[in-house]
Image (spheres, coloured by chain):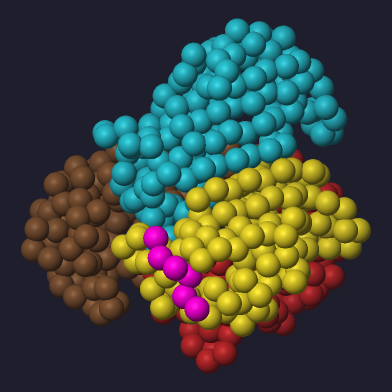
Chain colours: A brown, B yellow, C cyan, D red
């Protein structure tokens, strides 16, 4: 399962180099995760409301080509690896028209409760994540 | 009482026009409010920890001159008007060296609790705010 | 002419009050302007590429209700007033489902070239703006 | 050479988990690089004005502990590896008082001109970077 969702680059996301500032891609990855969670019927918003979060413990981004204001980008999100308490999402962002690669990356998360204590990923979400493990 | 605090423009705060993106100034105003609250011994962080927030109900910014990457800016913050449940902060941001005006503005706030209900500003903070009302 | 476009609140746009941080709405207004410019066939991206910008000289936001993570918002954008060198956009952001009002506001802009000098809004864009002046 | 610079967490940098949003640390790393460049008399701002940029080609962050609103953080920045066209900065962000580790990471950069073409790092900057290579 790879879930694809679009974003349109905002003006505020550019910097004085005339390209999308590199930190923005972590926000796009997050948009990808949220779209993924809905596509597998395990909404991240509901997980938050249930008192859990997938805290980021590692993030990596490789930049292949710059993106620019008003460019349509496609964010592809999948699950590289899942366990009872942790999940690694992987991403590829490409130009929405040419499919030229813009960035790739991954984020690793652990499930925590509102006190920040590590917890098992609750059943419904764990099942959705495990069923949709994709690999590299 | 006017409290002055400095910021150094970050690269990420610029946009492709080569200047500080206009939304950034609301973040600088917030930096100014936090500095003000400490200067009058009524820390905004402690107000938050006590379960209250000063929710923004109105914000206005007038842009006089652009600011650029790595420019040192001085944020001047004061209280225009205070009442038992509301407070209006005013701001002037100037170049840290030439004192040339960059932006001016204000934000109006009401005190709310964690459920978002309007509440009186707790005593310590109200006193600090009222004692330091400055006017236009 | 009122142009409506949607955004889905991103997780990163929330703050520790659990609501959308107030500065985010200036970014949403910008998304609204860009959508407006396309709807009237006078793309803001092309204006930038032609060497002009609509620099913000004033921004005002009134906050009516908080918005939350993953909420779908509709941004309504129109032109309040246009002249040869300046334009004022007005905005109303509402919940995408209930149409409950979230924020209203306006931004005033002047046309500048790459050196920051005030210039007439180039013909094609001026025509599109003037033809679609809407008023309050 | 390790350069240390401070930031105070801004309210807008928190998210609804009540902690600093993870993307913020890439902005702090950038603040660290800018401080480093000044400490070695090779200002990044001047490099930009000379027509060059250090484009980010890879970024990695490991999150050790959450940071919170109004927390003072110390950003430690050093050069892990430098060559004629590329440089890798490494970072450790710790609590400004307890020195508890918050995040670690690195960013890899290549020197590009305004057209985005890979170029040698200009002499003055290359010398400053090479002279201050620190390693892991």
Left or right: where B24 falls relative to A122 = right
Residue appearing at x 24%, y 78% in the figure? A118
Q: Quadrant of residue B16?
A: top right
In this rendering, position of residue B115 left or right of residue A132: right
| Residue B119 belongs to the span the image colors magenta | yes
Depth order, front residue of C132/B3: B3
Quick one: which residue is furthest to the front in this view? B84
Q: Please tell me whether the stretch drawn in magenta is mainly helix, strand or loop.
A: loop
Task: Specify whether residue B1 is in view.
Answer: yes
User: Does residue B107 sit above or below A51 in this rendering?
Assistant: above
Identify the image quadrant of the C terminus of chain D: bottom right
- The answer to whether residue B129 is magenta is no
Q: Residue at x 50, y 78 (%)?
A: B123
Residue at 65%, 79% (x, y): give it. Answer: B40
A109, B24: nearer the viewer? B24
Q: Which residue is farthest right? A: B98
Question: From this viewpoint, is residue D24 visible?
Answer: no
- What is the magenta range? B118-123
Quadrant assignment, res A4: top left
Q: Is residue B60 above or below residue B7?
A: above
Q: Position of residue C70 (x, y in %)?
A: 31, 47
Image-quadrant location for residue D82: bottom right
- Where residue A126 sits: x, y (%)? 13, 61
Q: Residue at 84% across / 33% down in the picture?
A: C115
The percent position of residue D96, horizontal first and vertical second, equals: 58, 85
- The image shows residue B55, relative to residue D76, as above or below, that is above
């Amino acid at each position: 399962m790879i879930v694809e969702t679009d974003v349109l680059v905002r003006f505020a996301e550019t910097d004085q180099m005339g390209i999308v500032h590199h930190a923005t891609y972590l926000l796009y990855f997050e948009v990808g995760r949220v779209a993924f969670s809905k596509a597998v019927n395990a909404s991240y918003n509901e997980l938050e409301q249930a008192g859990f979060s997938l805290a980021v413990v590692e993030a990596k981004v490789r930049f292949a080509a710059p993106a620019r204001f008003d460019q349509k980008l496609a964010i592809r999100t999948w699950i590289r690896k899942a366990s009872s308490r942790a999940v690694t999402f992987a991403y590829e962002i490409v130009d929405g028209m040419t499919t030229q690669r813009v960035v790739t990356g991954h984020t690793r998360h652990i499930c925590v409760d509102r006190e920040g204590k590590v917890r098992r990923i609750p059943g419904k979400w764990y099942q959705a994540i495990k069923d949709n493990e994709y690999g590299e």
